Amino acid sequence: MTVDMLMFAGILTLGEITMVMERYLTGVISTAIILSFSFLTGCSHTNSGSSSYSTSIPFAQPSYSFSKSRPPTGRSVFVFDPKHTAFGAYNAQGILVRQGRASGGKSYCPDVGRPCRTPSGSFRIYRKGGVDCKSSKYPVGEGGAPMPNCMFFHGGYSIHGSGHVPNYNASHGCIRVVPSDAAWLNNNFLKMNSQVVVRSY
C-alpha cells in the first residue's frame, strides 16, 4: 500500500510520518515505511530533555557494502564513509562483523556560520559515555542535546546514537548511528583506544 493510499484511508497523516520509503536493492526494490518518532537527537538537534531511546527502530541497511576484510590491527576498528553515509565495524583480525547507516557533519551549519564536516583521518576512542550522554555545546548557547552511548574520538567529535540518521550528512560533526548500533558499539565493540577511521568526503 502506498503512502498516498494510507493517507487517503486515514491510517497515516503527514504529521505522523518523519521518514518514508527507505529504498534499497536486494535483488528487487524493497520499500520500508518507518512511522514517526518525535524525539530529536544528535549534534545538531534540541530535544525535550528525554534520554530514553528505543533500540528496535527498523532502519534499512546501507546500500553500500564494505569490504569483508582489511589488514588486521590487533584492535577493533570503526570505519565511517561520509560519501556513502555508512559505517563498517572490523574486529581485531580485520574481519567485517557489522555495518550500518551513519550520518556525519554537514557541509555548512547556519547556526555557527561555518562548515561542519567530520574531520577525516585516523583517530582513537579516548572517552565514552552512557545513554545519558549529552552535548555541552549544542543547541548553540544551551547544550543538552542527547548523544546516547557517545564515544569520543577527536576533541568534541563522537560517535553516538540518534533517532535521526538520514541518508545524507546532517550533524554538526558527530557521527550519528541508529540507537541499536550505538549501544552495540559502545557496550560490545569499541574500547578505549579502539581505532576510528573517517574517510574523506
Image (cartoon, rainbow, N blue to C red):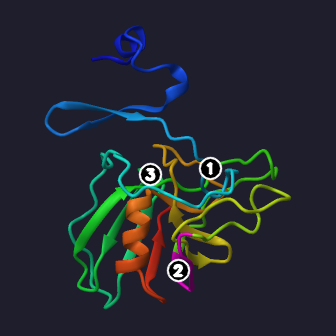
Instruction: Please indicate, yes or no, whether residue 189 appears anywhere in the rendered image.
Output: no
Q: Is residue 50 above or below residue 33?
A: below
Residue type pointed to by label 1: Lys
Part of the protein shown in magenta: 122-131
Q: CA separation, marks 2 and 1?
A: 20 Å
| Label disc, if present, on residue 92 of the rendered structure | none
Which residue occupies 82% across, 59% down? 142
Given contact means CB atoms under 8 Å apart, are the residues at marks 1 and 3 in contact? no
> Foreground residue, 32 or 36?
36
Measured from the top left, where is residue 191 in percent x and y?
43, 86
Q: Is residue 46 above or below residue 77?
A: above
Query: As drawn, which residue projects farthest toward the top?
Result: 8
Q: Is residue 21 above or below residue 7?
A: below
Q: Residue beneath label 2, please? A: 123
Given contact means CB atoms under 8 Å apart, are the residues at marks 2 and 1 in contact? no
| Label disc, if present, on residue 106 of the rendered structure | 1
**What kind of element bears circle 1?**
loop
Asked whether, in this view, residue 190 is left or right of residue 127, the answer is: left
Residue 127 lies within the magenta run:
yes
Measured from the top left, where is residue 47 in percent x and y?
68, 51
Residue type pointed to by label 3: Thr
* Nearest to N terminus: mark 2 or mark 3: 3
Instruction: Please indicate, yes or no, whether residue 157 appears anywhere in the rendered image.
Output: yes
| Label disc, if present, on residue 85 of the rendered structure | 3
Which residue occupies 71% across, 53% down? 115
Q: CA separation, marks 1 and 3?
A: 11 Å
Measured from the top left, where is residue 30 in percent x and y?
23, 32
Residue type pointed to by label 2: Phe
Residue 141 sits in quarter: bottom right
